[in-house]
Image (tube, grey):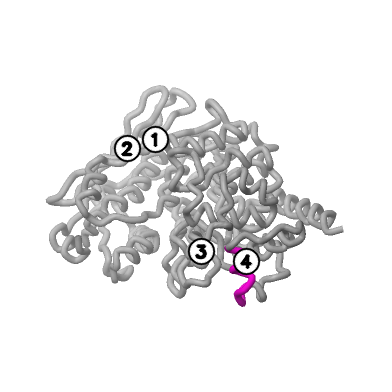
Amino acid sequence: MQYEELRQKYTDFYYHSFSIEEDEKQLRVTYDFEIKNLSHFHPTFTLAKPDAESIAHDPLIRGCAFSLGMVELISYWKISCPPHVHACCALEEDQVRWWKKLYFNGLGEFFYKNGIQTNEDDFMDLAGGKEVLPAITAQKQTTGNLIAVGGGKDSFVTMDLLKEEKEHNHAFVINKVMSAIHSAQAAGYTGEKLINPTRTLDPAMLALNKQGYLNGHTPFSAMAAFAGYLSAAVWHKKYIVLSNESSANESTVKGSKVNHQYSKTFEFEQDFNAYVKKYLPADIHYFSMLRPLSELQIAGIFAALKPYHAIFRSCNVGQKEEKWCGHCAKCLFVCIMMTAFLDEEEVVSIFGRNMLADPDMKELFEELTGMQDNKPFECVGTRDEVNIAVAMGIHRYEKSGRNLPALYTFYKETPYYHFYQGRSVDWHSYNEQNLLPEHFAVIVKAKLKEMSDESGKLED
């Protein structure tokens, strides 16, 4: 269905209300959204509580629940992209601008793939409602880390970096994503140490998608940020620790701001912290532990964490079955990264096959390296990082006397190889554009020094 046609037919989206129910064990938030003349939607978010204390009327909890609804609504708004959006609670002008910026940039891939030409001013007008949320005044004591776990190499590196603080840590996984749950459990987060809220999608949305209404990527990490903040407020956690690296800042579509990973960028991390500081004030701090690091550095650190190699999963295609599909861009990207640090047998033992020997992966390989303008719409590293990893992998193959796989044989004949050959991971690099509290920065810098020292011994 066409964007303009749908906007003319369905002009108004309503975030009517949110309700919070609780018992001694859990909290449940239910939302009431509506696309006028099309459908109502009632998604939910259910979270275990640490104790029986009643918190449903706590101003911070209510503010968090409302804000989570503000980011949840975009999944339903995109069905027909109504030009007028009405929220149930009052919004300041700064809030309106903040949410419109998130929606517009977080939907960059959705607009691009659906061929929608619009801008931040015109795609939506957003108005607040009459209800005024109560002021947040009381500050409860918080402690420890809430570590978001996705199941990939990045979250394993973060959990390993924070292993000395495990007594005060909780792992956080939304929904029964078994690869992520098993990853958290492998790192020692079991029972109450694993916070596992349930987020439901309204079946009416899924039905409309099947009927041909608009569909596409939404800023999932922004939803996870607000879900994490609500969870931290309920569980009295001081730090929400992510595993987003600096490469998330690079656009997916060359020469544009379209970024599959927008809500993983440093820009969003800064915006989120500014928002909660003003509108959800609490002693809770949101940051990415790996923001100072490159994908290459993270891959090198993870390569040494051998016990987790059989457990980690990053493939979105094979997620439900907890496997690597071995044919998608994400699988190929991780394969390239690991090949920079591991021998061929080790890489094959992880993925089940050597994707670098498969000529059918050539187009994805060209997208990842920048031979084609646009990167795959996946959470992958920068073009520069991929090329350096390829050069490192080629050096590793040749040093061991092995024949190069097909994709690396092809790469050696391109100008890219002549530009990148000889380059390697820089263990002295530390991206200062980050929000790490000082004692976390000390941990990351110590790991970089350790890796640099180890690398020096190998070269000697």
Q: Is residue 413 magenta?
A: yes
Q: Quadrant of the N terminus?
A: bottom left
Please, what secondary structure does the residue beneath circle 2 have? strand
Q: Residue at x 73, y 50 (%)?
A: 447
Foreground mark, 3 or 2, reads 3
CB atoms of marks 4 and 1 within 8 Å? no
Label for residue 234? none
Q: Percent x, y for residue 140?
A: 51, 37
Q: Earlier in the sequence, mark 4 or mark 2?
A: 2
Disc 1: CA contacts within 10 A as few (<14), some (14-19) or many (>=20): some
What residue is pinned by disc 2? 44
Which amino acid, by three-letter code, is at mark 2? Thr
Q: Percent x, y for residue 450?
A: 78, 51
What residue is pinned by disc 1? 198
Disc 4: CA contacts within 10 A as few (<14), some (14-19) or many (>=20): some
Please, what secondary structure does the residue beneath circle 1 have? strand
Q: Where, by quadrant of the figure, is residue 27 drawn?
A: top left
Q: Earlier in the sequence, mark 1 or mark 2?
A: 2
